[in-house]
Amino acid sequence: MITARKTFLPFALPLISERAVEEVAAVLRSGWVTSGPKVREFEEEFARYTGAEYALALNSATAGLHLALEAIGLCSEDAVFVPAVTFTATAETVCYFGAEPILTDVDPIFNLMTESTLREAIRRECVLSKGNLVHKKTGKTVRAIMPVHLAGAVCEMDALNSIAKEYHLYVIEDSAHAFPAAYKGRRIGTLGDFTVFSFYATKGITTGEGGMVTTRHPHFAERIKLMRLHGINRETFDRPGWYYEVVSPGFKYNMSDIAAAIGVVQLSEAEELWKRRILISEIYRSEFSDLPFLHLPLPANDGDHSWHLFRVEVDRVRGKIDRDILCSELKKRNIGCSLHFIPLYEHPFYQRFGYDKKHYPNTDAMFQRTLSLPLFPGMTDGDIEDVVAAVRDVFSGL
Ligand SMILES: Cc1ncc(COP(=O)(O)O)c(C=O)c1O
């Protein structure tokens, strides 16, 4: 007989403290609810925490990826390297410009873009013309790479940065999962030309919806600042009078002070939230270490993992266990799970780019085997015990 939890445990939930609720109430009472002093405070604190020179708050990471690509002047004659294992936002923003997302495979352990998967994609897809990489199939010029720190494991940034330098490419890190991970002792946020963070509900810190771009380049910071609010050359909060000028067709991507109020508090609690994630991942790794057919995520890749996700891999043993069986058995026990990610080339939209599955063997293997277990700082000790008991129960007797 199956023993199920009384209530369903989702795979992720935000943890918002009473202090954040009070700060939001204070903003609501202040009369200034759109981008203003709280956004500025959040940006300053975030820049201090990450060591970044510039931090620009936005209403999503997707907006950040879009504005980073806009800042480098991406156009329809360009191409960008994106790992096949990511959320659509990474590649869709390349498509906004009519540019070509060229997919790289990922490594078999962390499922990240690596030196070897990037070099392999360069060899397969590109020719060198006047020092620039040109996509053989479309003739488009490669302008950037977008490494994704999947689940919170950081890509080998030294190697990726050096390939980028070799071929004059910008590095736009998709760090939606990676706050507050670190690489070789450096907090994420200063490694590439741009680092893009997400504050979506389930992320390391949240503002409900929100994002941040960090960069060391003053001209890119200026451009993002301009383009996040309609291309208007003065921020509303700073404007002394009624006069302003529209100097570019910008976007409506600014963060509100309501969201920033949550962000400031979440940032001050980030270490605590992160510690809880680390603890849960350690409990899982110890409790599941003896289970057959279950492969556990490694703690880090040259740094500190953010433990945004706990992605396991399941062997396929016909009629006994595989990823889909584990998922449905957990559901029967009232435990939620998720999958990160369906490879981009599997989606109908991306099929127009003609990706050939045989170039992505590690991505394909990942897709057959991966599953994300519940991991969020608000999990009680009882929740953790329930997940451990349910997973162990599914594997018992195998
Ligand atoms: C890898 C990755 N990149 C980008 C995003 C987009 O983040 P946002 O929802 O803040 O736009 C997500 C969202 O989950 C993501 O998982």
Image: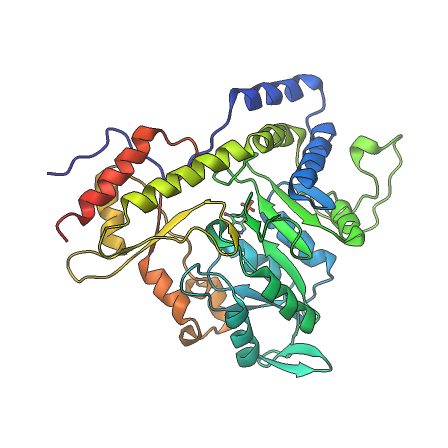
Residue at 48 percent of width and 63 percent of height: 349
Q: Residue lying furthest front in this view? A: 185
Q: Quadrant of the N terminus?
A: top left
Looking at the picture, how far across and down is residue 115, in whole percent? 54, 69
How many numbered discs, if any?
0
When the figure is inspected, residue 387 is found, relative to residue 304, above or below; the finding is: above
**Relative to 203, is 99 on the left or the right?**
right
**Relative to 251, is 353 on the left or the right?**
left
Q: Is 49 in front, or is 65?
A: 49
**Relative to 115, is 257 on the left or the right?**
right
Residue at 66 percent of width and 16 percent of height: 29
Looking at the picture, how far across and down is residue 324, in whole percent? 26, 54
Looking at the picture, how far across and down is residue 97, in whole percent? 65, 62
When the figure is inspected, residue 377 is found, relative to residue 355, above or below; the finding is: above
Whether residue 327 can be seen here: yes
**Relative to 52, is 358 on the left or the right?**
left
Q: Is 353 in front, or is 144?
A: 144
Looking at the picture, how far across and down is residue 177, in whole percent? 51, 48
State the colouring used for the structure image. rainbow
Residue at 47 percent of width and 36 percent of height: 275
Residue 81 lies in what quarter of the image?
bottom right
Whether residue 146 can be seen here: no
Residue at 37 percent of width and 42 percent of height: 282
Residue 268 lies in what quarter of the image?
top right
